[in-house]
Image (cartoon, grey):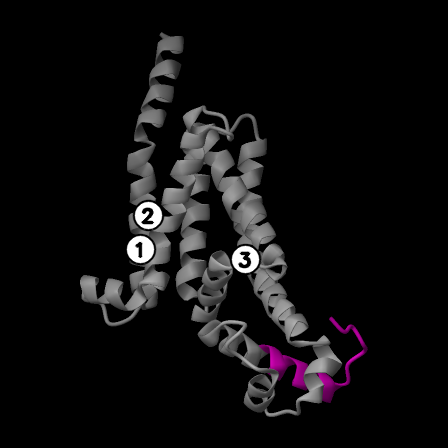
Amino acid sequence: MRSDHLTPRGNSTRTNLLAAATRLFSERGFDGVSTRDIANAAGTTLPSISHHFGSKAGLYQAVLQRVSEEMEERFSAASAAALEIIANEESTRQQRLHGLEELLCEHARAILQSSSDWVSLITAEDRLPTEAAKPIEQVIGKHVIGPIVQLIASVTGASAADPEVKLQAATLLGSVLIFRTRRTATLRFLQWKELTPYRIEQVSEHLRREVQARFAGCLRSQFGAEHGARG
């Protein structure tokens, strides 16, 4: 990827190329898009791609890098709060469960509010993984999957390496993706016209209740242990 100093005009061209490439790659996949398609959509010339990105592969890598940066910006605050709760030895299971709810709800909002290009690109990379997707995988692992697994483990008293903990994390995270991967069918099933901000909060609140119901037994066992110790 080129890192030359950019003039305002050059920066505008680069931004337009990234926007056009993001849309086209998400719609058609890497192999279904030519550099000429991207240049035309961006309103620029073909050589501008090689000037700014070196090649179509370099442009694709830049697109996924930008997606990973946007994801990190979105998730970093919630994951930092979750990790702070985990690091605090005095935090209760209720506090850890609340941290889990908050991080899962932030993940749900990010997925449902984000551009559909995000999900299309990530889904395509999941089917046919490339090295370009590593920044996205790292962000998801660091700011979403890792903290969620640690929170579930701390709530249940299990190890973060326990397969059951990982399965619980995967099912909770996956329950939101249907609104993107099967958007039209899911909205039709729910008789919703669009995923409005109100509907997104409905999904988040349902996810919160699901978490509370799933781990209610852990809270009761802690309460019982504490009550017995005091008695």
What's the residue type where badge 3 is placed? Answer: Pro
Q: Nearer the viewer, residue 169 or 221?
A: 169
Task: Confirm or deny contact between disc 3 and disc 1 (CB under 8 A).
Answer: no
Viewer can see residue 95: no
Q: CA distance from mark 3 to mark 2?
A: 29 Å
In the picture of the structure, the residue carrying the numbered disc 2 is 207
Counting from the top left corner in percent of width and height, residue 138 is at 60, 51
Q: Please report whichever mark, 3 or 2, sits nearer to the chain's N-terminal start.
A: 3
Q: Nearer the viewer, residue 130 or 44?
A: 130
Q: Quadrant of the C terminus?
A: top left
SS state under label 3: loop
At x 54% / y 33%, what residue is drawn? 86
Viewer can see residue 159: yes
Residue furthest to the top in view is: 231
Counting from the top left corner in percent of width and height, residue 154 is at 48, 29
Magenta-tinted stretch: 1-18
What mark, if any, has residue 36 been given in the picture?
Answer: none
SS state under label 2: helix
In the picture of the structure, the residue carrying the numbered disc 1 is 203
Q: Is residue 16 magenta?
A: yes
Quarter where residue 110 is shown: bottom left
Task: Confirm or deny contact between disc 2 and disc 1 (CB under 8 A).
Answer: yes
In the picture of the structure, the residue carrying the numbered disc 3 is 129
At x 78% / y 72%, what residue is drawn? 3
Give the side of residue 207 with respect to residue 60, left or right. left
